[in-house]
Amino acid sequence: MSIKEQIMKTLKHEILTLTLKPGTILSETVLSERFQISRTPLRDVLKQLSLESYIDIYPKKGNLVSFIDLESVEQIIYLRSVLEKEIMKYLSAHLVLKGVHELKEILDRQKAAIHEVDATEQFLNLDDAFHAALFRLAGREFLWNLIQQSNVHYVRYRRLHMLRQEKLEEILTEHQRILEYMTRQETDKLDALIHHHLREDINSLYLQENFSDYIKV
């Protein structure tokens, strides 16, 4: 991995985990000193981060970590909702026992993670693992990977909602119900559950009331 790739990976991780909060100024001078790299290759990194919506570059203000774009979040939620409804209906008829065990193991780990010190980080990773497994078991892993390429706003939106333990418990319960409905082939119950599971938070006031300074105006 080249030095530019390492810097890109580090900054993406810090933005997605909110170590670098929305609106944070990324000084070229500070970054150049931190990573021991000259301005020219650093600007290449920043340009790529801008193209992928991790940062915004303003002529006078400089480089700012992008604010969370709720319109982008809604678009990703819509896409996932449409895809996952079809995937879960497919799996209701085609999910093999090995796949059931894999999903149950992820849910067991999610349940344990809720009470860990770094619950949000662990739970978010396992949430991704659960949904990624659904796509893979349905032969749609390419689509999952495609969604991850436009995920910068959605990941941060989910992370903020998962700071509440009651939200983690709600997500786990809904995951358990998803698996239950699939294994029982109760496909008529999946649409409403998936709609609620993915879309409920987009209309809540939680982010506006607690993290309004992170949201794109």
Image (cartoon, helix red, strand yellow):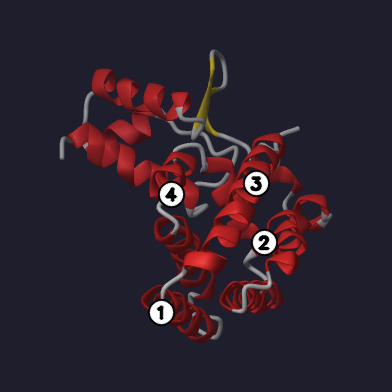
Q: CA distance from mark 4 to mark 2?
A: 27 Å
**Residue tagged by mark 3?**
82
SS state under label 4: loop
Q: Residues within 10 Å of mark 1 (few under 14, many from 20)?
A: few
Residue on which disc 4 sits = 140
Q: Measuring 28% from the left and 21% from the top, which residue is drawn there?
A: 39
Comparing 118 with 168, the one in front is 168
The residue to which callout 2 is attached is 161
Residue marked by disc 1: 97
Q: Quadrant of residue 200?
A: bottom right
In x, y percent, where is residue 97? 41, 79
N-terminal of the two: label 1 or label 3? 3
Residue 103 is left or right of residue 206, and the answer is left
Camera-nearest label, 2 or 1:
1
Whichever of labels 3 and 2 marks the residue nearer the N terminus, that label is 3
Amino acid, disc 4 = Arg
- Secondary element at tag 2: helix
Nearest to the eye among marks 4 and 1: give it. Answer: 1
Question: Horizontal placement of 149 versus 71: left or right?
Answer: left
Mark 4 touches mark 2? (CB < 8 Å):
no
Point out the tag, 2 or 1, that comes first from the N-terminus.
1
Figure check: 191 above or below 149 = below
